[in-house]
Image (cartoon, rainbow, N blue to C red):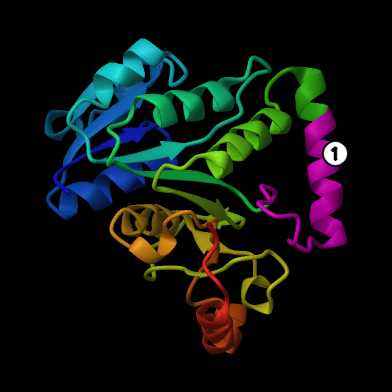
Amino acid sequence: MKRICIIGISGKLGQYMAEHALARGYEVVGVCRPKSVAKLARIGERITIFPGRSDDRAVIDAALQGCDGVLTVLVPWGVTGYATGTAQAVLDLASPKARLVFSGGWHLSRDGRDRYSLKLRAFIAVFRRLARWLRVADLGDQEEAARRIFASDRAWTLVRGSDLEEGRGVGLPVWARHVGDPLLASNRTRRSDFALFMLHALSDPTLIREAPAIVGRDTASARAHAGASARIRERAQPQA
């Protein structure tokens, strides 16, 4: 894999992904809104930027030319189907053999077997209503985007992140198939490490058509349960 596209490259997660990719010798292409291009000044000369909305199919089509890996930050901004439009454009327009890796949150459930804490359920319920009422974000849009990804026969991965924090990276996060696994109880991941996992997924065939829920590898729950969760995953049948 030589050339990758990062959709949503100007955000914090996108910039971390770009830094990790450049450090590993990838040629990096990025898509971001025109008003956000200035955020990339530090690395702008080392990447190719396509200014535009990430749900603009013409922009995505141009950016994906020659890319064999695509990292997409699914953001549900507004109430116009932004995340769904972004995901569909990537699914439709990426090269047939491209690896597609999307980012989302724990609330995106593939099979309904995730177990959420009362606190997390309450937060999601309040945020869903308030954000929609203010017209700033739509979790339903992000959930629809996830459903389309899950239904696709492409080589996709949807990485579901825990609560994020800044700080120096500590290494590749650990993961479980379902929220509620004791491995994930600490609910903390460094943003830089989330980005590292996104990049790692490009070259890990065991993550194809998986929706891993991740947590920082140095958290208390990860240290206590990583071995047991890994054994459970090894016994589980791969999901089609």
Q: Residue at x 30, y 22 (%)?
A: 38
Does the magenta-highlighted stretch encompass residue 9? no
Q: Is residue 102 left or right of residue 42?
A: right
Corner quadrant of residue 143: top right
Which of the pair 226/17 is nearer the observer?
Answer: 226
Horizontal and vertical percent for residue 169? 38, 64
Horizontal and vertical percent for residue 225? 59, 85
Does the magenta-highlighted stretch encompass residue 125? yes
Looking at the image, residue 138 lies above or below residue 122: above
Looking at the image, residue 148 lies above or below residue 17: above
Which of the pair 101/164 is nearer the observer?
Answer: 101
Horizontal and vertical percent for residue 7? 37, 31
Looking at the image, residue 231 lies above or below residue 40: below
Q: Is residue 15 left or right of residue 104?
A: left
Task: Give the secondary structure at mark 1.
Answer: helix
Q: Is residue 102 left or right of residue 200?
A: right
Dot 1 alpha-carbon crowd within 10 angstroms: few under 14, some 14 to 19, many 20 or more: few
Number of marks? 1
Q: Residue at x 70, y 55 (%)?
A: 111
Q: Is residue 162 left or right of residue 94?
A: right
Horizontal and vertical percent for residue 17? 33, 47
For the record, the magenta segment spans 107-129
Q: What type is the residue that disc 1 sits on?
A: Val
* Residue ID for mark 1: 126
Q: Residue at x 56, y 54 (%)?
A: 161
Q: Residue at x 27, y 27 (%)?
A: 64
Corner quadrant of residue 147: top right
